[in-house]
Amino acid sequence: MREKNIPPLLSNGEISEKLDIPLQKLEEAYCKGIIKYYKEHGVKALQFRKSLKHIESGTMVTLGDEMEVIRGFPKIRRTLMLYPALEKHFQDEIAVEEKMNGYNVRIAQVDGHIVAFTRGGYICPYTSRKATEILDLDQFFQDHPKMVICGEMVGTLNPYVSHCYPEIGKLGFRIFDLREKLTNTPLPIIAKRKLLLDYGLEPVRLLGIFPIKEAPEKIMEIVRELGVNDREGVVMKDPQMQLEPLKYTSSQAQDSELEYALSYPFDLAQAFLFSRIIREGFQAYEMGESSDELRERALRMGESIIYPMLNTIHRVKEGEVAAEDLIIEVDSEEEAQEFIRHLRDLKVMATLAEFKDGKAVIRRIHQSTTDKINNYLQGGLY
Amino acid sequence: MREKNIPPLLSNGEISEKLDIPLQKLEEAYCKGIIKYYKEHGVKALQFRKSLKHIESGTMVTLGDEMEVIRGFPKIRRTLMLYPALEKHFQDEIAVEEKMNGYNVRIAQVDGHIVAFTRGGYICPYTSRKATEILDLDQFFQDHPKMVICGEMVGTLNPYVSHCYPEIGKLGFRIFDLREKLTNTPLPIIAKRKLLLDYGLEPVRLLGIFPIKEAPEKIMEIVRELGVNDREGVVMKDPQMQLEPLKYTSSQAQDSELEYALSYPFDLAQAFLFSRIIREGFQAYEMGESSDELRERALRMGESIIYPMLNTIHRVKEGEVAAEDLIIEVDSEEEAQEFIRHLRDLKVMATLAEFKDGKAVIRRIHQSTTDKINNYLQGGLY
């Protein structure tokens, strides 16, 4: 094994005990790069880049005045068929919450400061600032310092996943889970909503709690309706939160992801295509669509594939680079630059394209797409 | 390096000299499995499973009375854009031959017997038999024993790629190259066609020889027309055959490959999807299609993706396995079994589903597709 300087804190046994992972496993994981030392935005921590035994990827062990564990947000599995998967997976009742199209954020208090972590466990400076602007969190964390607020940052001025929600506008935060720091135990659905209400914090929409027998049909209807309104889908949960939740998305969500991926085909399409197409196939099957509905689905999917690709080829032909512009609201150019440095830590190539009137245009460049399209346009062979 | 029993013939220097590859490289390649010893259907040979320096994958060094080298058929590269790729790649004139949708076969005389090799260098017993039935090759090989006939086996009674050509019917063979055994040197276009005519052998269609300036437009028109008639595309060649040929295919060919791949999504789709979609994007761009034409292309592609997948889900739901039935004409059940053994050598899982009146139904089973669809239909999570 390659020797690395293992931080003394990792080796003193406290973390091993807290996480219930043998010391040797932790040291091995550190040497393999599964656990990394993290120091950004005033927080020192051990960051889990991948899962290790029962500890989720994205978990942060913060090493401040008090050592704390902020567990990673658990991966939510997907079902391709509502029936019979729901019946097999859940008991009695299913709570259906809206799955929104934004990015997953965990907000927690670390050494008295409120910080927002991305899925991977990185502190996002922009999200941390916006979360505390949008939400009044002080009282909540004063009363519940051991809780983690898990939710979706959504809206159009969104540096990761920009999507228009009429009720959100530029930027909003909707909460789907309240979890305990060390154990990752979530509150039951009703208790969670009650507590959020008490603090004036906004949960994601609860679309119903259904007996298991009725659930597939009800949920399919909900998802169909969500799709028509350009909304993503649902997360289905055991009301007591004793069982793993499942997710299910609308055809339109699949297509809009295809559209995005095919805008940057040589950077994103390979990873996106197969799974979205499979989802469409099973959904078409379960919905038992008429030949007109099927034709409509086929056309919608075909258009989501061809049009964005064609559009990008045209843009590159005109001399542009294949890039997406993300707009964020910041108080200073330095704040924008700080965000760009954060993106680079995540290996995302981005530049500041414009800064004006508190708005920064962050340009994310898709280099392979730009290079390959240029090459083919110039007669390069495939 | 793992020790293997290197066949003495490989080590005596003759092959090394013939192929112009150092002895040590050959021995290394043998140990790595790049070269394998082959003994089937009365032929002993060294088979190149992968390319090695300038020697193509599929090359066979036959070890009979006389040692001979039958070179692999060179990979033909694809262009995504006719303009400017053709101008960059060719000189003066471009000969355009039809690319047919069947399987690539090399026919050669080995120790006085006429044998048909598949692309990978395997002797296909069915093809060997059919080729000699369909074609009158004795005189040709008597006069030209050092030549290899390269062509496409096409038609509906085709165990690899069944496609309906009105002028072919059940089974036919169309020749695109005459090459020299050891050097792989092809005859120029006109010389090849003349020689084939002399022996009553059928070449693929020559669709024109165009000055380079006119070629992109002419070829696009040809490919559009081929597509409308459900035909695959073209191979573009230097009339002198001094330059590497290029290929280009119709939108309908892309879609029919998608259709095939999506019929067995968990076995084939991953490998097929991306490249076919990319081809469609660049073709739509180069054709400068109207919004109606684009919509039609999008619909056609979407339907090629959704319908076959849906159809297979339905079939598996009904208890069928995801399988394709290939029909071949054989004189006896033993001949069919021999072909199935050949398929198994190629790692293709197949069984004899029916044998009646000289027709054998070979069932090729796509196991992952069958298993995964069953799992999802029973509520398995993705």
Image (cartoon, coloured by chain):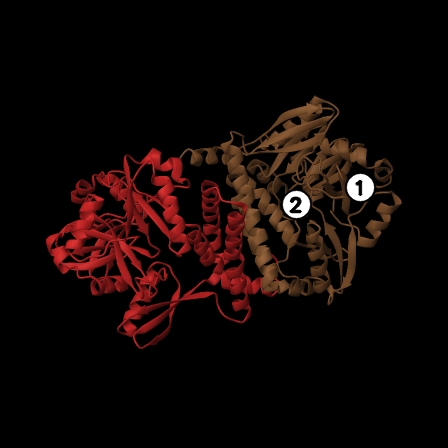
Chain colours: A brown, B red
Q: Quadrant of the C terminus of chain A?
A: top left
**Residue farthest along the right direction in this orientation:** A198
Is label 1 in a helix, a strand or a loop? loop
Q: Is residue B105 left or right of residue A45?
A: left
Residue pointed to by mark 1: A146
Q: Is residue B225 left or right of residue A162?
A: left
Q: Position of residue B273 (x, y in %)?
A: 48, 50
**Residue farthest along the bottom direction in this orientation:** B357
Viewer-closest of A149 and A37: A149
Q: Position of residue B319 (x, y in %)?
A: 52, 71
Viewer-closest of A55 and A338: A338
Residue found at x 53% / y 50%: B298
Residue pointed to by mark 2: A56
Find out whether the residues at labels 1 and 2 contact each other: C-beta distance under 8 Å.
no
The kind of residue tagged 1 is Lys
Q: State which chain disc 2 sits on.
A: A
Q: CA distance from mark 1 to mark 2?
A: 18 Å
Q: Position of residue B24 (x, y in %)?
A: 24, 39
Residue found at x 59% / y 45%: A259
The kind of residue tagged 2 is Glu
Q: Residues within 10 Å of mark 2 (few under 14, many from 20)?
A: many
Q: Give the quarter of the image for residue B53.
A: top left
Q: State which chain disc 1 sits on.
A: A
Asked if badge 1 and badge 2 are on a common chain, one would say: yes
Q: Give the quarter of the image for residue A217.
A: bottom right
Q: Is residue B55 left or right of residue A346?
A: left
